[in-house]
Amino acid sequence: MPAPADLSERARARSSEKILFLFFLLSLPLINPLVRGDGVGYYAFARAPLIEHRLDFTNDYLRANASFREPRVDENGGIRQAFVTSTGHLDNHFTPGPAMLWSPFLLLAHAGVLAARALGSAAVAADGFSAPYRWAMALGTALYGFLGLLLSFRLAVKYVHWRWALLATIGIWWASSLPVYMYFNPSWSHAHSAFCVALFLFYWDKTSGERTFGQWLLLGTLAGLMLNVYYPNALVLAAPGVEALREYARRLRAPAAKWKGAAQLLSRHVAFSAVILLCLLPTFLTRQIIYGNPFESGYIPLNNWLWRSPVLLAVLFSANHGLFSWTPILLLACAGLVVFALRQPRLGSALLAAAGAYYLFIACYPTWDGLSSYGNRFFVSLTPLFIVGLAALLEKLAAVWSRERAALAASAAIALFIVWNLGFILQWGTQLVPAHGPISWSRMVHNQFVAVPRQLGGDVRTYLFRRSAMMQSIEQKNIEQMKSQLPGQE
C-alpha cells in the first residue's frame, strides 16, 4: 500500500495536470486557423482525399498563400511543369502523418457542413477550405500539442518532483518554438511531432523491462506513427537502440542457457521493426503514387547533405535560427539532460543518445536553419526530452539551495525566458526581424525593449480580432523579403 506521502505527491501531480489543462483552455484564443507555407502540403493530404477522393493537390496549390503559390503557378494560372512529377501528380514531399491525425476532426467538420447544407444552409462551402475545416484542423493541432506536453510532464514526474516537472513543462511550452507551431502555424507538422515523440517515449519507458510481445507490437505502431508524421523522428529510435544494446550485452554475458533469452529478444525486435514498416505504408503508398517510387522522399538527395562538414555550432548558436541563440531556455534543458543521464543512467543515457543523434542529423541537413522558421523548428520534436532535462536541472539546483528559494528563483527565471520568447515571437511574426535568414541581434534586442512594448497592445488586439487582415499584411512583407533575397536583388 502506498505511503501517505506518496499519495500526497500523486495528488499534487494530478493537480498540476489540471493547472496545465487550465493554461491550455486559456490559450485557445491564440489559435490561428490558417493553412500556409509548408502547411499547404501537409493539409493537402487531408483535404484532397476527403473532398476530391484522390491525391490531386491542384486546388490546394492554387488557393495557397502567395509565397507558397507564386513559385508554383505560371502567368496563365496553371501549375508550372517543374512541379509536376513523372506520374503526373503535383510534387508534395510533405508527410501524410499530420493528415492522419487531423482526420477525426476533419471528418466531424465535414459531416457538420454537409448536415447544415442538407438543412438548407448553403453559406458554408463543403470544400475543405472554409472556416469549419480550418478551425477543426487548428483545434486538432493545439490539442495534440497539449497532449504531447501532458505526456512529457507525466514522463518527467515519474523521475523528478512534480514541482520541477510542472515548471519545466510550462517553461518549454512558452519559451521554445512550440507555441508558434501549436497556435500560429497549426498546419505545419511540428506540434504533431512533439505529441508522437512524447507518446512513443512515454509508452517505451512505461513498458521498460520485460515487454510482452503485444507491447512490442504496440510500441512499433507508435514508432510507425512517429515516422509517418516526421522523418527525422527516426533518430529518436536511438533511445530504444541504447536499451537494446544494454539488454543484449546483459543476456550474452549470462550462462549459455540464457542465450535463449537473447534470441527471444531478437525475435521481438524483428517484430517491432516489421510493425514499423507495416505502419509506414501510408508514406510508402503516397510516395509511390506521387513519385513512382515508394522510397523517394522528394527532399534533397542524401548525397547532397553536409556529411563531411556538419554545421555543428551554427545549428546551436547562429543568428540564422540557432537553437540556443533563439530559444536559450533549451541550453539549460540540454544541460539538464546530462544531469539526468548521470542520475538516471538507464533512461537518461538513452534520451541523451537520441538527442545527440537528432542534433547530428540536423547539422548535416543542407537547410538546417529551417528557412522560414521561428528558432530551429526541427527540434520541436524533442519537446519531451527538453522537459525532462529542464526538470532535472531545476531539481539539481533545488538540492543546492533550499526548496523554497529554488522554486522562487526557478519561477522568476522561467517567467523571464517566457516573456523574452513571446516578445521575440511577436517580432518574428510581425516581421520586425526577418523570417528568413540571419537577424541582427542589436536590432532584435532594441526591439525587445522599445518596439515590442510599444506595439504589444495593438498587435495583440489585431491578432485576436482582425486576424485575416494582419495575416495578409505579414504575408506581403514575407513576399517582399523573399524577393529581396533572390540573386541580383538588393
Image (cartoon, rainbow, N blue to C red):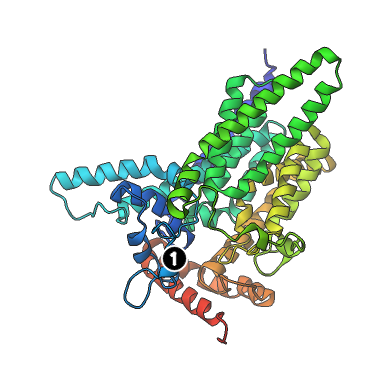
Q: Residue at x 61, y 20 (%)?
A: 213
For residue 40, side relative to residue 454 (left or right): left
Quarter of the picture holding the N terminus = top right
Q: Is residue 62 above or below residue 241?
A: below
Helix or strand or loop: what does disc 1 sit on?
A: helix
Residue 43 visible somewhere in the drawing: yes
Q: Residue at x 37, y 47 (%)?
A: 136
Q: Nearer the viewer, residue 213 or 286?
A: 286
Q: Amino acid at mark 1?
A: Phe
Where is residue 276 shown, x and y percent of the image?
A: 57, 35
Where is residue 485 shown, x and y percent of the image?
A: 56, 79
Where is residue 482 shown, x and y percent of the image?
A: 52, 76
Quarter of the picture holding the C terminus = bottom right
Q: Nearer the viewer, residue 357 or 427?
A: 357
The count of marks equals: 1
For residue 29, side relative to residue 122 (left or right): right
For residue 190, side relative to residue 474 (left or right): right
Q: Nearer the viewer, residue 292 or 17?
A: 292
Q: Nearer the viewer, residue 207 or 68?
A: 68
The image quarter in which residue 257 lies: top right
Where is residue 13 shown, x and y percent of the image?
A: 62, 32
Q: Is residue 369 above or below residue 281?
A: below
For residue 326, side relative to residue 178 (left or right): right
The image quarter in which residue 109 lies: top left
| Few, some or many residues within 10 Å of mark 1 (<14, 14–19, 20+) | some
The image quarter in which residue 476 lies: bottom left
Residue 12 visible somewhere in the drawing: no
Q: Residue at x 47, y 75 (%)?
A: 479
Q: Which residue is disc 1 drawn over? A: 83
Q: Is residue 201 above or below residue 233?
A: above
